Image: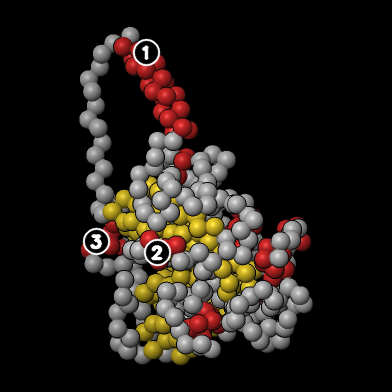
Amino acid sequence: MTDDTTSSVSPLLSRRNFLRAGVLGAAGTGVAMYASKQAPRAAAAAPTFVPTKTDEVHLVGTDGWVSMPTSAPPVDPYWPDSYAPNPYNMYVFGFRNVTGLSDAQVIAQRGLAQISAPILAFDEGSEVKISLTNLGLSQRPDLVDGHTMHWHGFNNAIPIFDGVPEMSASVPIGKTMIYYYRPHDAGTFMYHCHFEDVEHVQMGMNGLIYVRPKMNADGNRYVYNDARTKYDREFPLYLSEVQPESHWRDAHIQITDWASYDPGFSLFNGRAYPDTLEGTFDPMTVYPAGSQGERLRYQPRGSVITANAGETILLRIASLGYIRHTITLDGVPLHVVGADATQLIGADGHDNSYITNSVAVGPGESRDVLFTAPAPGTYKLYDRNFSNLSNDGGGGYGGMLTEIRVSAPGTLPAQAR
């Protein structure tokens, strides 16, 4: 870690690292002494790993404000939060992608968190460096919580980069830590802060990671290294929920009893319907006052799915909420080809994928789902649990509901990578 909160530099040799190096050095000496007593043997050629490319990402962790649909009935005094600056109404924690920003721009992101976190996409076999800077909390300077980067479901060779504070390290306020990864398996993963994780995940510190397979080098797109998983367009469907009472308590220096968890808003990509139908916004852009861009800039991604009839669509569905969801698309077969970043195929090559129209996703799980875009028209994609289809118990539809909008063949251009 380093005192420089705005640059990705090598970790300093702290007292702890110095002691760790001494222990490892002593252990290495013991191994060398033991080895010297053994019969000599031919040296094996060291395996060579050549990454296809190097990806570097800089994230910051902080707090901020977002907006749930204003049509929902108020829950006095918890929501809308009286502390929230206009046009926002709910307090959150979150990550922001600040890759390429200047030092001053990075520091200026304190208090401007987004949910859900930025989507990260890497290629199988690449070398990944993720710098995480803890900017602290503007609304709660009394909290000195650390933050971490935990790549959920990823097999880490070195515990220090796993992000579980009890076994690795957390990043204190004003510090930066660089996490190193080499993704060897394609699929849909998640990441989240693992410091006070019940609270920090609920408050919004979570997001999606795609790892794309080596087979994509042939110019096509596949979910896994299998021609049967080819697709034309991909879309994220990230599931989470928020409980307004707990967010209010964090903003107002109160304690939450998580055993009584009862979410008021269920979210696709950090938004509840009808905000799910709005377009994509840039958190760094200043939008006109009163516009949807201003209100949703820290929930930047909608969840409308667009396609041409006959195309193969990939839904990357993942959940870091606290309850089980069943995502439904009436009348359209859904082909589940992967679960928890693993292709559904046996060791003998037997295809274990399956067809359904309702995909069950539990907390901490992901699904890779293919479907063929049907005839032109508009179709509803939703959680079939009606308690997740309203906003804070209000009338009409809300929560986990979005649309699939299908055009005639050849209408839409190819999806940009």
* Mark 1: amino acid: Tyr
Mark nearer the viewer, 3 or 1: 1
- In the rendered image, which quarter is residue 343 located in? bottom left
* Mark 3: amino acid: Ala
- Residue that label 2 marks: 104
Residue 410 in the image: above or below residue 188: below
Q: Kindly identify the residue that appears in the image at 51 percent across and 42 percent down.
A: 169
- Residue that label 1 marks: 34
> Reading the chain from its start, which is encountered first: label 2 or label 1?
1
Dot 1 lies on which element? helix
Q: CA distance from mark 2 to mark 1?
A: 53 Å
Q: Position of residue 148 (x, y in %)?
A: 51, 51
- Residue that label 3 marks: 217
* Mark 2: amino acid: Ala
Q: For this rendering, which residue is in front, 112 or 389?
A: 112
Residue 416 in the image: above or below residue 215: below
> Reading the chain from its start, which is encountered first: label 3 or label 1?
1
